[in-house]
């Protein structure tokens, strides 16, 4: 393949360089993967309506996120098992984010520990929290505080593991077990295999059961069991434990977003987990404008973003920033930290080009006035009225690790 010039090119490179079972874990969704397709299709219904005769000789991609300037309205999303894609994958992602001037969110299911990433990378570090067991939650919060994480992101859309059929067909398990298909795939992908052998099979550093004395915690760790009972009282408990910025990720209703803010969270991330949890699920973009209208707090969004123009559409609809996951992982699998930086560079370039094309000199000046949507699409991707962050908006224009001793499919 010639030099990759867009995210899809990096996806194809990742597919070539990774064993099938690893690529399918990265690329796949749940069940029939309608949600994956829908996350992309929804962007096609949002069109730009450029403003002409504007001075766009200089464009500014930077924005303010929680009172701090970031180079572009981007955040690297929390993702797990990145050590399977590239040795020290989490550190590579965090380093690329720091160089790009944007925050990085470390997953509970990372292969590098909170402390290791905080020690090795000089950038803004957020920590994403899966609700596995209350005792483990308390310990992870204390560790994130001690490591200097500025923000805690609580994921609320993984009550149980999802039905990811690609992983089931591949019999994908973690930790990896040496089976005939793995050996065959390893022979077919020698560079990946050599890196794995040289660096060892990565483990979930934040979820290691070593040192855990409580038997319930050990059992939960072995099974990767999510706390399906986590509710508003649980969120209030997290708020009381965490004195810094708190975000909730996985909300898809404006009413839930509003209640999160009322409960003391500082912002909400609209997300359907990239189509990896519930297949027939609304896209975050479809509820974005309504959530923005009802919440007096920053609204972030993820799921399905592949182009800088997608990011511009989300910001025009009222989002403060966009989290990107799979795109930077394609870059990571293709070429480590350099690949991640290239993908972030592609996003920035495409955002800049889109701003120039629509007649907008800065991301902070975006509003839905730059968008055109037919009346029959407004119900699907509604535009609501609000004024937030100094950006004016107006009325709509129309319109198993499961059993001890036996590994299983990770829920992350």
Image (cartoon, rainbow, N blue to C red):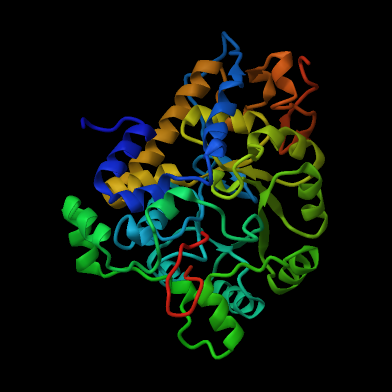
- Residue 115, by quadrant, is bottom left
Left/right of residue 283 with respect to residue 55 in the rendered view: right
Residue at 57 percent across and 9 percent down: it is 52
- For this rendering, which residue is in front, 323 or 355? 323
Residue 344 location in percent, x, y?
Answer: 40, 41
- Residue 153, by quadrant, is bottom right
Left/right of residue 223 with respect to residue 2 in the rendered view: right
Residue 226 location in percent, x, y?
Answer: 61, 67
Quadrant including the N terminus: top left
Residue at 80 percent across and 68 percent down: it is 233
Decide: is 396 above or below 24. Answer: above
Residue at 59 percent across and 65 percent down: it is 129
Q: Is residue 219 visible?
A: yes
- For this rendering, which residue is in front, 54 or 237? 237
Decide: is 70 above or below 388. Answer: below
Left/right of residue 58 with respect to residue 68 in the rendered view: left
Question: In the displayed image of the protein, which residue is found farthest to the bottom?
Answer: 213
Question: In the displayed image of the protein, which residue is found farthest to the top?
Answer: 53
Left/right of residue 120 with respect to residue 393 in the rendered view: left
Decide: is 353 above or below 330. Answer: above
Residue 241 location in percent, x, y?
Answer: 71, 74
- For this rendering, which residue is in front, 254 or 15? 15
Task: Please tell me how many numbered marks the rendered image carries.
Answer: 0
Q: Is residue 338 visible?
A: no
Residue 28 location in percent, x, y?
Answer: 45, 45
Residue at 66 percent across and 77 percent down: it is 134
């Amino acid at each position: 393949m010639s030099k990759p010039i867009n995210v899809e090119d990096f996806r194809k490179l990742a597919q070539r360089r990774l064993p099938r079972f690893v690529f399918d874990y990265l690329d796949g969704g749940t069940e029939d993967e309608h949600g994956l397709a829908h996350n992309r299709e929804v962007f096609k219904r949002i069109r730009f309506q450029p403003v002409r005769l504007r001075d766009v000789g200089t464009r500014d991609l930077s924005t303010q996120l929680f009172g701090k300037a970031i180079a572009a309205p981007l955040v690297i999303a929390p993702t797990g098992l990145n050590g399977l894609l590239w040795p020290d994958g989490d550190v590579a992602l965090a380093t690329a984010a720091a160089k790009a001037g944007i925050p990085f969110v470390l997953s509970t299911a990372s292969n590098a520990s909170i402390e290791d990433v905080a020690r090795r990378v000089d950038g803004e570090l957020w920590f994403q929290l899966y609700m596995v067991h209350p005792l483990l939650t308390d310990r992870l919060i204390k560790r994130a505080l001690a490591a200097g994480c500025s923000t805690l992101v609580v994921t609320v859309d993984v009550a149980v593991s999802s039905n990811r059929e690609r992983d089931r067909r591949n019999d994908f398990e973690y930790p990896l077990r040496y089976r005939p298909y793995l050996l065959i795939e390893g022979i077919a992908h020698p560079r990946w295999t050599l890196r794995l052998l040289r660096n060892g099979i990565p483990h979930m550093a934040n979820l290691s059961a070593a040192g855990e004395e409580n038997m319930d915690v050990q059992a939960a760790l072995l099974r990767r069991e999510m706390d399906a009972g986590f509710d508003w009282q649980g969120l209030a408990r997290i708020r009381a434990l965490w004195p810094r910025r708190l975000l909730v990720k996985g909300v898809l209703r404006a009413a839930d977003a509003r209640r999160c803010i009322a409960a003391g969270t500082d912002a909400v991330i609209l997300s359907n987990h990239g189509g990896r949890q519930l297949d027939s699920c609304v896209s975050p973009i479809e509820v974005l404008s309504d959530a923005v209208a009802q919440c007096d707090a920053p609204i972030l969004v993820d799921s399905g973003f592949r182009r800088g123009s997608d990011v511009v559409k989300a910001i025009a609809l009222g989002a403060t920033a966009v989290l990107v996951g799979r795109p930077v992982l394609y870059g990571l699998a293709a070429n480590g930290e350099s690949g991640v930086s290239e993908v972030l560079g592609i996003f920035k370039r495409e955002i800049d080009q889109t701003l120039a094309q629509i007649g907008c000199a800065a991301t902070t000046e975006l509003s839905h006035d730059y968008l055109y949507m037919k009346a029959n699409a407004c119900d699907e991707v509604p535009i609501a009225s609000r004024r937030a962050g100094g950006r004016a908006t107006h009325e709509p224009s129309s319109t198993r690790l499961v059993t001890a001793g036996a590994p299983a499919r990770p829920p992350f």
